[in-house]
Image (cartoon, helix red, strand yellow):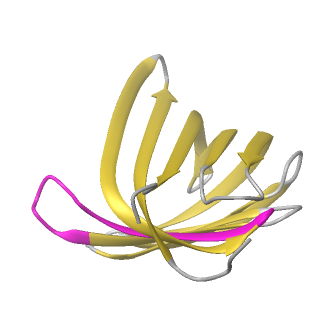
Amino acid sequence: MTTAKQAVHVRLDTTITDDGDTQTETVQVTGEVIGSGMKRMIRFTETNDQNESIDTVIMVSEDKVTLKRTGAIHMSQQFIENKKTESHYQHPLMRFRMETYTDAIDYIYSDTDQDLSLKMRYRTVINGAGERTHTLKLNIKGDKNG
């Protein structure tokens, strides 16, 4: 069991349903994982449709998940099962207040390698208007060849 950085393959699938309209997005990149057992920090960089970089850090622990994004957008969001949390989402054009209600967090990890799976279902209300339903699926696979 190691706490050193390890290069990993990251697949992040997100689905957002807003007033009957569903959007899906998949990100597949190389990233890194630091930590072992239940506590992990996953870092990766993605590029949006405008070719701007977004750095993402996801910290997973026993009782919560924290998602931080910087670059083209800025946000720090906490997910605690069956709890409401509040945060802000900074887009280049404006800043939004976001309330998050986390319905479920399913986290599967290995004590012997960096492979992990995280699935979250949650709802958001942005600037006090309309509820959106989200599903986030994160799959991490370590590079078995070194």
Q: Nearer the viewer, residue 117 or 128?
A: 117
**Residue 55, position as x, y percentages in the image:** 36, 74
Q: Residue 71, percent across and down?
A: 30, 78
| Residue 50 shown in magenta | yes
Residue 118 falls in which quadrant of the image?
Answer: top right
- The mark total stands at 0
The residue that appears at 73% across and 70% down in the rendered structure is: 36
> What residue is at 56 percent from the left and 41 percent from the top?
136
> Does residue 14 sit above or below 115 in this rendering?
above
Q: In the rendered structure, which segment of residues is drawn in magenta?
A: 37-53
Whether residue 54 appears in magenta in the rendering, the answer is no
Q: Position of residue 27 (x, y in %)?
A: 33, 46
35 displayed left or right of 5 = right
> Considering only vertical position in the picture, is 78 above or below 140?
below
Q: Quadrant of residue 82?
A: top right
Please give left or right for residue 116 compared with residue 24 in the image. right
